[in-house]
Image (cartoon, rainbow, N blue to C red):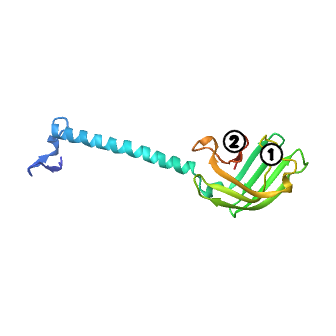
């Protein structure tokens, strides 16, 4: 049988058949030290990677905001579709109109603490009581929405934070 020759401490050849970690206290100590070092490095690296992953999941990128967001109010629904070409479509269904009312405009992205989307020429649709404003379509303004993860889950859907009770939640 072929054996691999190891060089010992003083340059002598050691047959691998004679090397046994359990019989050699020096090898056993070296293996223990290596295991401890590996465990320390792993225990330090895992939290760093977890924090980095969570940070990126909590702080959405512009490429993640494209899609359809929906908010349900007491007397209606608002849908905002954010397109890749920096345009959006806002559609409101309410008890004030038999047909959905549509608005369109452009949007910009600001990469601040959490990310923010600004809809230009947007309707401010709902009141703080969760009702659709009777004359929401008569006035357009800048709508600023911080973009966050719903309920702060790192895997939760994105939402446009218009109010705590009635956020615009990304549905697709």
- Inter-mark Cα distance, 1 to 2: 16 Å
Using the image, determine if residue 23 lies above or below residue 93. Answer: above
Residue placed farthest to the bottom in the image?
85
- Position of 29 with respect to 56 (left or right) is left
Local packing at callout 1 (Cα closer than 10 Å; few below 14, some 14-19, many 20+) is many
Q: Nearer the viewer, mark 1 or mark 2?
A: 2
Q: Provide residue 124's location: percent of width, then percent of height.
A: 78, 52
Q: Provide residue 59's location: percent of width, then percent of height.
A: 57, 51
Q: Provide residue 36's location: percent of width, then percent of height.
A: 29, 40
Label 1: state its secondary structure: strand
Label 2: state its secondary structure: loop
Please give the label number shown on residue 86. none
Q: Provide residue 65's location: percent of width, then percent of height.
A: 65, 55
Residue for point 12% across, 47% down: 14
Q: Which residue is mark 1?
A: 77
Question: Can residue 24 be seen from the camera position used here?
Answer: no
The first of marks 1 and 2 along the sequence is 1
Name the residue nearer the viewer: 9 or 12: 9
Residue for point 86% across, 56% down: 138
Q: Which residue is mark 2?
A: 164
Residue for point 71% across, 44% down: 163
Q: In the rendered image, which quarter is residue 21 located in? A: top left
Name the residue nearer the viewer: 113 or 6: 113
């Amino acid at each position: 049988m072929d054996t691999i020759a190891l060089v010992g401490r003083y340059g002598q050849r050691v047959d691998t058949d004679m090397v046994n970690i359990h019989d050699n206290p020096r090898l056993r100590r070296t293996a223990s030290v290596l295991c401890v070092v590996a465990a320390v490095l792993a225990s330090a690296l895992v939290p760093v990677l977890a924090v980095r992953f969570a940070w990126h999941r909590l702080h959405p990128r512009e490429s993640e905001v494209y899609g359809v967001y929906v908010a349900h109010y007491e007397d209606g629904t608002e849908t905002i579709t954010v397109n890749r070409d920096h345009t959006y479509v806002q559609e409101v269904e309410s008890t004030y109109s038999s047909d959905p009312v549509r608005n369109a405009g452009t949007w910009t992205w600001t990469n601040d603490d959490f990310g923010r989307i600004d809809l230009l020429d947007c309707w401010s649709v709902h009141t703080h009581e969760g009702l659709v404003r009777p004359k929401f379509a008569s006035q357009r303004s800048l709508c600023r929405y911080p973009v966050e993860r719903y309920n702060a889950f790192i895997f939760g859907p994105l939402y446009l934070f218009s109010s705590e009770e009635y956020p615009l939640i990304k549905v697709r």
